[in-house]
Amino acid sequence: MRSGTAESFFSNAPLCVVAPDGSVTRRAVVERLVWDESKSEGARRCVLALEGVRTRAAANAFRGAYLAPAKGAAPSDPFGATRGYDVFDAAGGMIGQVYAIESGEGAAVLVVRDASGVEARIAANWESVHTLDRRTRRIVVRRT
């Protein structure tokens, strides 16, 4: 699925899936965003999971489609509603839960608290975050 800036579509706002012929095929909400860096050295592509699309056959129906904000939908900060999400490192180790979201210089910061109350601050941007999954309420970060 192609889009201008994929991460700008990852908000609570619904999207329209626009077929190559320009027709709007459905409205959808992005459920999960994962950065895939496995294709070629240094290249990244964004993989989006749409709410309700659970099989390869269903996903294939969207090949070549574009995403566009639904009429009247205002984009929101994709990290704005992540309080309570579990945060993991790239190796799968749990770092903690998002306790708060603070304003930082140029970007928001996720305040992550572990079980013993120790806090870590992680930049809320796509350089730090690898996966943001609304369905499982899980964030995977590249580094802490």
Image: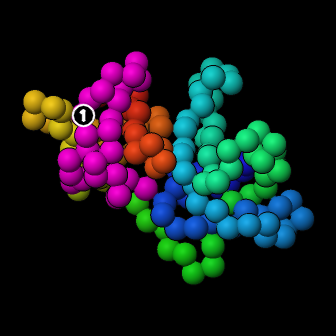
Q: Is residue 95 above or below residue 104?
A: above
Q: Is residue 45 above or below residue 14?
A: above
Q: Residue furthest bottom?
A: 72
What residue do we see at 63% from left, 23% from top? 38
Coloration mode:
rainbow
What residue do we see at 14% from left, 36% from top? 119
Amino acid marked by disc 1: Gly
Quadrant occupied by the C terminus: top left
Q: Nearer the viewer, residue 22 or 32?
A: 32
Task: Say which quarter of the image contains residue 37.
Answer: top right
* Residue 64 visible to an observer of this rendering: no
- For residue 32: magenta? no
Q: Is residue 80 above or below residue 64?
A: below
Horizontal and vertical percent position of residue 11: 49, 60
Horizontal and vertical percent position of residue 135: 48, 48
Find numbered disc 1 in the image and state the secondary structure of the residue it sits on: strand
| Relative to 100, 72 lies left or right | right
Horizontal and vertical percent position of residue 137: 40, 45
Q: Please tell me how crowded label 1 is: few (under 14), some (14-19), or many (20+) other residues with Cα within 10 Å.
A: many
Q: Nearer the viewer, residue 121 or 32?
A: 32
- For residue 91: magenta? yes
Residue corresponding to mark 1: 96
Q: Residue furthest left?
A: 117
Q: Residue furthest right?
A: 21
| Relative to 39, 115 lies left or right | left
Count every numbered label the image shows and give the total. 1
Q: Is residue 79 above or below residue 19?
A: above
Which segment is the magenta one? 78-102
Horizontal and vertical percent position of residue 49: 62, 46
What residue do we see at 21% from left, 51% from top? 100
Task: Say which quarter of the image contains residue 115.
Answer: top left
| Relative to 125, 108 lies left or right | left
